[in-house]
Image (tube, rainbow, N blue to C red):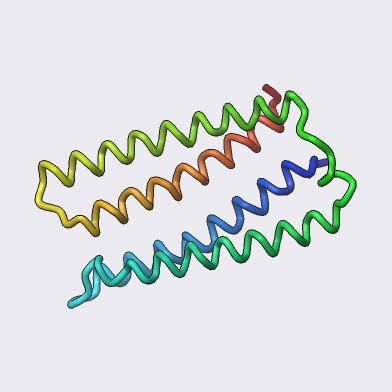
Amino acid sequence: MDLSFREKSTIVTLIITVILFGNYLVRACAAMTSAGQGIEQLTGLLVSTVLLSIVVSIISHIILASAFRKQASSDDDERDKLIELKSLRVSYIIIICGSIWAAVNGLFFSVSSAFVGHVIAGFFIFSEIAGDTAKLFFYRRGV
């Protein structure tokens, strides 16, 4: 199976997102279920996970670009742009629905603002995974 550079980049991003934020999710759930720890203590974990994700993504894409120098330097064609737009649509729908759901829960139910923030962050993570998955689907299936 011959993959384009954009597909390889998307796969790397998807793997990084699933591993790092999956680890965050497991640790956050364990912290919330243990006695004496609230969701407010998880903010540092979330920030460190995001920063680690940025650093690992930059390093992995530098390695990927140096390994596939010719493909990495090519410009996006119309197909790449259309795939990017369609996958962004999937991501944005999830972000909007999740943000509205979190805001409604924050306004009408007695949940903390930290909980609402973590729910919104969770929907951002889910939207990134769904957008990358949609991008891979559109590359394989065609647009």
Q: Residue furthest bottom?
A: 36
Task: Give the quadrant of the C terminus.
Answer: top right
Q: Nearer the viewer, residue 58 or 124?
A: 58
Q: How far across and down, in percent of the image, does residue 130 sit?
A: 51, 40
Task: Give the quadrant of the N terminus.
Answer: top right
Based on the displayed image, in which of its 4 quarters is residue 71 positioned? top right
At x 18%, y 43%, the residue is 105
Based on the displayed image, in which of its 4 quarters is residue 39 positioned? bottom left
Left or right of residue 30, residue 78 in this image: right
At x 47%, y 66%, the residue is 49
Left or right of residue 77, residue 18 in this image: left
Left or right of residue 4, residue 96 in this image: left
Based on the displayed image, in which of its 4 quarters is residue 12 positioned? bottom right
At x 40%, y 62%, the residue is 25
8 shown above or below 118 = above
At x 33%, y 34%, the residue is 97
110 shown above or below 25 = above
Q: How far across and down, in percent of the image, does residue 74 sit?
A: 84, 39
